Image (tube, rainbow, N blue to C red):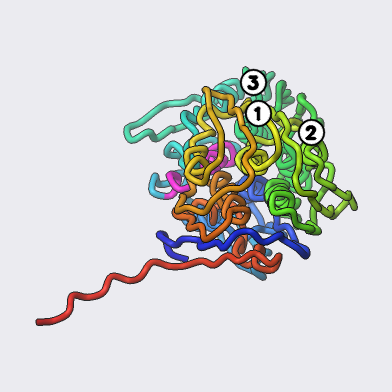
Amino acid sequence: MHSGDIFVIQGGKPLRGSVTISGAKNAAVAILPATILAQGVCVIENVPQISDVQIMLEILQYLGAEVKSLNPHKYQIDTTHLRSQTVPQEMTKLLRASYYLIGAMLGRFGSAKVASPGGCDFGIRPIDQHLKGFELLGAEVSYEQNAIIEITADKLIGSQVYFDKVSVGATINVMLAAVKAEGLTVIENAAKEPHVVDLANFLNMMGADIWGAGTDTIKIRGNKPMRGCDYTIIPDQIEAGTYMIAAAATHGDVKVKNIISKHLESLTAKLKECGVQVEDGGDWCKVSAPNPFAGSHIKTGPHPGFPTDLQPQMTVLLSIASGNSSVTEGVWDNRFKYVGQLLLMGADISVNGQFASIEGVDALRSATIHADDLRAGAAMIIAGLVAQGVTRVEKVDHIDRGYEDVVEKFRKLGARIKRVSPEPARAASAG
């Protein structure tokens, strides 16, 4: 895979067949740094093969962990001899979830030094709630040059931590530190996402004492001895949702396997509202869509609300649904950047701040478009699949961050999609 690769998509063909969903990106990038707390050997299964995971594994190796690939989706990680507590900026800037290293290293060593994280750009992504949580546990936060954050604690003490707004990142980060704090920590207004629950389950397997994950109050009795363990990551609800929406948008008929259907209830409800048929098999679902389907009104919100990470994909579907639809973004400030690409394809969407009004069109037309971020990139693939003609999607390295083997999975469903690397620059001919 090269930076500069593009996807070339010949649209207009319904998706048919079955697709198997990989491990959850958002769980993997929290569970991998959590191995730091084990001071032993962990074996993690159902790890997705995506660039965000590869970067996290490289950071762990840089810190002194021994990382062994047992198969493409199974890793043995030994953090017994970790030596560094500083993560260099050239690594953190590639990965938003690098901030989870702060909680894990603070828990294990009582100190961490990490540069401000990277990842997708949806406007400001402050980590003030994370830092507030660490300070309530007794840590001191200081800022150095180049946006380096240093956090130290002589001793972490359990505390009441109330988040001013629901934050998945802050919930996870404070959990990581609190498992090594003395006494009881109570996190209120906690995020309830499936990957928060998955991390809590993993930490408990290592010896932590956490209860209430999946509700808005999580309690942690800290300072328990932590050991290595074997653990399997949950399936990726956002990847599953992406293929479900793609199946519906192309008027296809697709079985989506290896899912937890409960995690997809908000999407399933909206698809059904549009007239899409969804058959629920517990660990699989089958999606088929009539022609045409109806519009809908969606507002994203923290779990169990409609996931912001499925908002761009759903907007593509609504752009070719009959009648008027709307999308209200309730999580991020700047998540409609991708709409400009859909306008190039003939969509009729107007954005006003956090609100998008969508007038359904009969068809999208092909164009050269680009991925503004990870989930917008998935939306561009869906747009290319439904458009007439050949669509070229640029900046696909964003998509590689969170979708394993995306071209092959779509090809197996009958999509006409290929990955094309840029021509190497030819040497100037002599003479």
Query: What residue lies at 53% left-to-right and 33% top-to-bottom?
Result: 336
Select label 1 or label 2 by which is in front.
Answer: 1
Alpha carbon of mark 3 to alpha carbon of mark 1: how far? Answer: 29 Å
Query: What residue lies at 64% left-to-right and 20% top-to-bottom?
Result: 163
Q: Position of residue 117 (x, y in %)?
A: 47, 39
Density class for disc 1 (Cα within 10 Å; few <14, some 14-19, many ≥20) is many
Residue at far front of view = 362
What is the three-letter code of the residue carrying label 2? Answer: Gly
Asked if the residues shown at circle 1 and circle 2 are in contact, with their CB atoms under 8 angstroms apart, the answer is no
Magenta span: chief secondary structure: helix
| Most foreground residue, 69 or 332 | 332
Disc on the earlier residue, 3 or 1: 3
Image: magenta residue range = 91-105
> Quadrant of the rendered structure where residue 262 is?
top right
Q: Position of residue 423 (x, y in %)?
A: 35, 70
Q: Is residue 302 above or below residue 65?
A: above
Q: Position of residue 9 (x, y in %)?
A: 55, 61
Instruction: Name the residue beneath numbered marker 1.
Output: 326
Question: Which dot marks residue 163?
Answer: 3
Residue at far bottom of view = 431
Disc on the earlier residue, 1 or 2: 2
Question: Which dot marks residue 214?
Answer: 2
